[in-house]
Image (cartoon, rainbow, N blue to C red):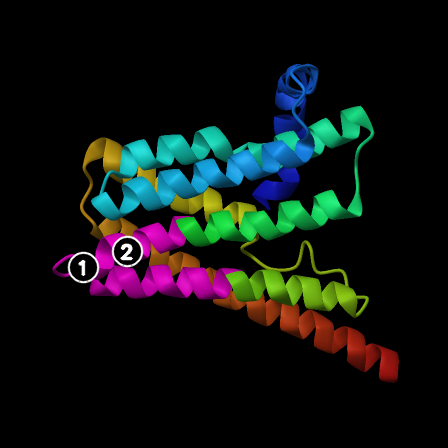
Amino acid sequence: MLNRFARAFITRLLTPVARVALRLGLSPDMVTVIGTIGVCVGALGFYPRHEFLVGTLVIVAFVFSDTLDGTMARISGRTSTWGAFLDSTLDRIGDGAVFGGLLLCFASRPGGQLTAWFALACLVFGFVTSYARARAESLGVEAANVGIAERADRLVVALLATGLTGLFSWPDMVLTVTLGLLSVASAITVLQRMMAVRRHILAGSS
């Protein structure tokens, strides 16, 4: 949902930045790699130490590379199948780092086991959601907009809750509830995509 409404607006904002990056000699692939490294550093370097605000600020600073690299590719005429594959693959690494960092943080904290389990569930269902979309599309089923919790939705909610928890020193229960709801929403999204594929296959065989 957020992906559909926000991407066009963010692209317009980042277009001047994309032009500057191209003048500096950066390629879209370089921006993709740099952005992923930055997200991983922010998530795995700060979240396990309970430094939620700093970690989130670092992640947010780099997460826009997900749109910046595509904008650069379109401006320069360097869109490619390889670039799309690299972007999607490294996106999953960055997502894994975010929820993995939260998992590492709470797994060793007294009373944090439930939150850690929810972070693990978000991690697993996030990957399954992406796989379900890729597999569906390989079967000729459009699944990009199927489900209540797309990748951008999950990431924005997780980062917002984590950053605000760090900023206002909210109790860990805020993250526990947020990650719990995200894990449920992710599981529902997987089921929705499975049902979409099932309907498509049954319609084709009837």
Compared to residue 56, the image places residue 98 above or below, namely below
Compared to residue 118, the image places residue 154 above or below, namely above
Q: Name the residue under label 1.
A: 108
126 left or right of 201?
Answer: left
The amino acid on which the numbered mark 2 sits, given as a three-letter code, is: Leu
Instruction: Specify few, some or many for label 1: CA neighbours under 10 Å numbering under 14, 14-19, or 20 or more.
Output: few
Magenta span: helix, strand or loop, mainly? helix
Residue 68 % position (x, y): 63, 29
Q: Residue furthest left?
A: 110
Q: Residue at x 61, y 28 (%)?
A: 10
- Mark 1 lies on a secondary structure that is loop
* Residue closest to the eye, 149 or 44: 44
What mark, if any, has residue 104 been given in the picture? 2
Q: Residue at x 36, y 36 (%)?
A: 56
Quarter placement of the C terminus: bottom right
What mark, if any, has residue 145 been given in the picture? none
Q: Give the magenta-colored segment's residue range.
A: 98-126
Q: Which residue is drawn at 43% across and 45% down?
A: 157
The image quarter containing residue 60 is top left
